[in-house]
Image (cartoon, rainbow, N blue to C red):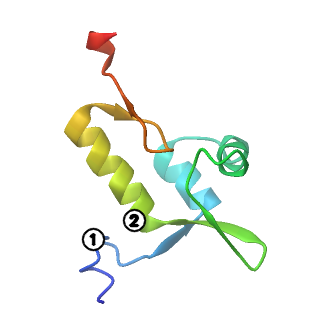
Amino acid sequence: MDQVAAGNASGQRFYRVSQVAEITGLSEPTLYRAIRAGRFPAVRVLGCYVVPAKALDDMETSALASGLVDAAGNVISPLSEM
């Protein structure tokens, strides 16, 4: 399947944790803690964590559609409904 057709406009399939930190505005240590706790999607390749671009795309889509989401995929009610 074509990488762009898979949904990622940049064609990149995986991001390094440092790239995800820049994209999301989170710190690298925060991301590593979340990954190790199973609260942020990542896979280990040759001893390094990488985040599938699709996971970031899905989080963005879900956030835009329903308000807020956490990285584990659980929808959080928008602040106005809390």
Residue depicted at 58% across the width and 41% down the height: 26
Compare residues 12 and 59 and report the one nearer the observer. Answer: 59
Q: Number of numbered discs present?
A: 2
Q: Distance between the residues labelled 2 and 1?
A: 7 Å
CB-based contact (under 8 Å), mark 2 and mark 1: yes
Mark 1 nearby-residue class (10 Å; few <14, some 14–19, many ≥20): some
Query: In the image, is residue 4 above or below residue 67?
Result: below
Residue depicted at 42% across the width and 37% down the height: 74
Q: Which mark is residue 7?
A: 1
Q: In which quarter of the image is the N terminus?
A: bottom left
Residue depicted at 51% across the width and 44% down the height: 72
Q: Residue 15 carries which label?
A: none
Can you give x and y, in whole percent of width and height, for residue 65 in the image?
A: 21, 40
Q: Which amino acid does label 1 sit on?
A: Gly
Mark 2, secondary structure of its residue:
helix
Can you give x and y, in whole percent of width and height, for residue 58 in the image?
A: 34, 55
Question: Furthest residue to the left?
Answer: 65
Residue depicted at 43% across the width and 59% down the height: 55
Q: Name the residue under label 2.
A: 54
Q: Which amino acid does label 2 sit on?
A: Lys
Compare residues 24 and 42 and report the one nearer the observer. Answer: 42
